[in-house]
Image (tube, helix red, strand yellow):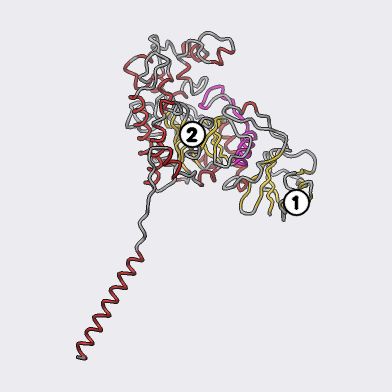
Amino acid sequence: MVGITKQIIILGSILVLMSCKTENKKEAEPAPVTVKKYEPNWESIKANYKDPVWFNNQKFGIFIHWGAYSVPAFGSEWYPRQMYMDTATFSAQLKLGKKGPNDTYLHHKKKWGDQKEFGYKDFIPMFKAEKFNAKDWIDLFKKSGAKYVIPVADHHDGFAMYKSNTTRWNAFDMGPKRDVLGELFKEGRQQGLIMGASSHYAFNWSFYNKKDKFDTTDPEFSDLYSTKGKNLEEPVSAEFKQKWWDRTVDLIDNYQPDILWFDFYLDTPDFADLRPKLAAYYYNKGLEWGKEVVINDKNFDHEAFPEGTVIYDLERGKLPGIRKLPWQTDTSIGKNSWSYVTDWDSKTANQLIDDLVDIVSKNGNLLLNVGPKADGTIPDDQKEILLQIGDWLAINGEAIYDTKYWRTFGEGPTEVKKGHHSEGQNKDFTGQDIRFTQKDGKLYAIMMAWPEGDNVVIKSITSNDEKIKEIRMLGSTEKIVWKQDKSGLTVTMPKDKPGDFAYTLELSL
């Protein structure tokens, strides 16, 4: 009996140990992960989507307009459209009393020949990009302080700047015969930048003027100039919409962009059914790739994409106050063009830094465009401006990157106009214009210019509000003298300016 009892006890012990191991094994197994799936309707997308924090933290990105339109280098990136505009179709022309062909049409006819014999398609073989070096570009963008880069993947002209599986009109098979987007994505990601792509292709449907005296009506080239006929009111065809869809999905699947930026015309009623379908497809792809992705849409006013489903973008414009949801301004270094033109007119680094500060104080990002030459070089004046911005960010970046907006964006006499294409109405900021950001117990007061006199008074920070413990000026080693009372914070400026542009006071709370 004793022997049998002992065996039973041993067997019981083994069973207990096996049970414990099984329970421990179960405890060690991770719980199944439930992946959210976006359905192609706004209810599903609004319920599941939230603007990624990472995008709002980056603050500064680079846009790149470069394509076959850089070869003529005249007018703007809309050269392909305007070279066929033989009548006054633009309201701006009509307002000026010009009833005939526009300047680009006349220029093309004089320099390149008749639009039937030498059309836009004939610039593509001339677009060699022989000096393009992705590493040189990305090195420059890194030095500028940019955190993300968005090259134009395909503009209204219909020429894809990547190795396309849906159109023969692409940079890998024609022109440069290189995967321009792919090279930039590879180099940018190797250097730690976030990479996005912009699509302007929806407007290709109506971009080119169709008349028999132009090559735009030749069926051989309808896959570049679109299949739309000569009727200006012709609605977008199902065939073109499918082409747009296939082209966009090809771009998403093969390059996995972190950001997908869309131009206008996608906001028209013709594309209403494809917008939620596209958002769901892309956001689900992000889940599949294990990363949060972003759509930028510039139709801020009428919500082609409902609020909270994308990050809104303003072209050449800003907001007058704080928007609690992230947003973005896209603008160009060039006042008169996005693509390189021979009469390119650059803004100053001071203007662009002030824009960056103003935008960030209102919870936005700045996407700043460069326009390379057709050979792939970035002009020296644009390089110099980017390097000046980078030098400023090297000193003042802690007041920009990863910051949040404060209870007020700023103070001062200079007002900012609201909306697309409003930047030309804005005045230069002064030393009395101050913008605020905050991070990690620090409040940053950024003066847009060096104030007149020895002192600056910041009225938004009184003794009834935040109690200041210490103040320093970024880039300066001088001790800052200050006092805080009910009228505000009075700061005595250091003797020497730490730089040539906006100046940052770091306030420890």
- Disc 1 on helix, strand or loop? loop
371 drawn magenta: no
Give the residue at mark 2. 297
- Nearer to the camera, 299 or 147: 299
- The quadrant in which the N terminus is found is bottom left
Q: Which residues are magenta?
A: 338-362
**Between discs 1 and 2, the one toward the N terminus:** 2
- Regarding residue 387, the answer to whether it shows in the image is yes
Give the residue at mark 1. 464
- Nearer to the camera, 500 or 454: 454
In the image, is 491 to the left or to the right of 438? right
- For mark 2, does the 10 Å Cα neighbourhood hold few (<14), some (14 to 19), or many (20 or more) residues? many
Q: Position of residue 113 (x, y in %)?
A: 43, 11
> Which of the two discs, 1 and 2, sits closer to the camera?
1
Count the numbered circles shown.
Answer: 2
In the image, is 411 to the left or to the right of 207? right
Q: Position of residue 408 (x, y in %)?
A: 66, 43
356 drawn magenta: yes
Residue at image point 64% right, 54% down: 441
Tell me the kind of residue under disc 1: Asn
Residue at image point 39% right, 39% down: 280
